[in-house]
Image (tube, rainbow, N blue to C red):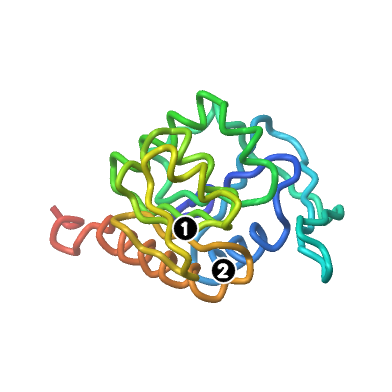
Amino acid sequence: MQSSQPKVLVIVGDATETLDTLYPYYRLIEAGFQPVVAGPEKRRYQMVLHEVKPGWTITKEWEGYTIEAEIAFKDIRPEDYLGIFFSGGRAPEYIREDEALLRITRWFWEQARPMASVCHGVEIPARAGIVKGLRMATVAKCKFDLEVCGGIYVNEPCVIDRNMVSGRTYHDNGHYVFPWIKMLEEARAQSKPTSASAAA
């Protein structure tokens, strides 16, 4: 049976960070939205766990859960979706050259639909050329990626600028996801026909 709930894209690839992805995924369901996982191909993807261990100066990586992408980027009709989320991990570095993904990203920005990004997810909107003058949070190591494309790095757990909500890492999940969900709820309310227009 086809769900009547508004659909929201969750963008992943191999080495997508597990907590970056699953926390917003299940929060969307709790809020009455239908998360639709999308990847370069319609298949199962391997997620990872990322953490800077005590005594380390770089990120250590372990395999996490897997996740099934329901749709490939090339098959997405963006107008069918209320919002989009860019997960972190190493995936964005590899999928940011996908022309279909870049086209979709630009469409959501131009249509001012709710967008969210965490950690390395910033590499996708940056590569799509939509961050000029845009304030965004991201992991410190991606500050250059954002700024070289004209964005403004903000070291805060939640940054909201126009229709983009962003966080630095999964440690910020409790700060930035709720404001994005509220933005989606407002967009859902605006998209519903009024009783008068429905009766017309």
Which disc, if any, is residue 27? 2
Residue 87 relative to residue 101: left or right: right
The amino acid at mark 1 is Gln
Q: Residue at 56%, 26% (x, y): give it.
A: 98
Residue 34 relative to residue 50: left or right: left
Q: Residue at 75%, 45% (x, y): give it.
A: 15
Is any atom of residue 194 visible in this view? yes
Sequence order check: which comes first, mark 2 or mark 1?
1
| Distance of label 2 from label 1 (alpha carbons) | 14 Å
Q: Residue at 36%, 39% (x, y): give it.
A: 130
The amino acid at mark 2 is Arg
> What kind of element bears circle 1?
loop
> What kind of element bears circle 2?
helix
Which disc, if any, is residue 5? 1
Give coordinates of residue 78: x percent, y percent: 42, 37
Give coordinates of residue 115: x percent, y percent: 42, 52
Give coordinates of residue 76: x percent, y percent: 50, 33
Camera-side residue of 85 and 187: 85
Give coordinates of residue 180: x percent, y percent: 42, 64
Camera-side residue of 109 and 139: 139
Which disc, if any, is residue 61? none
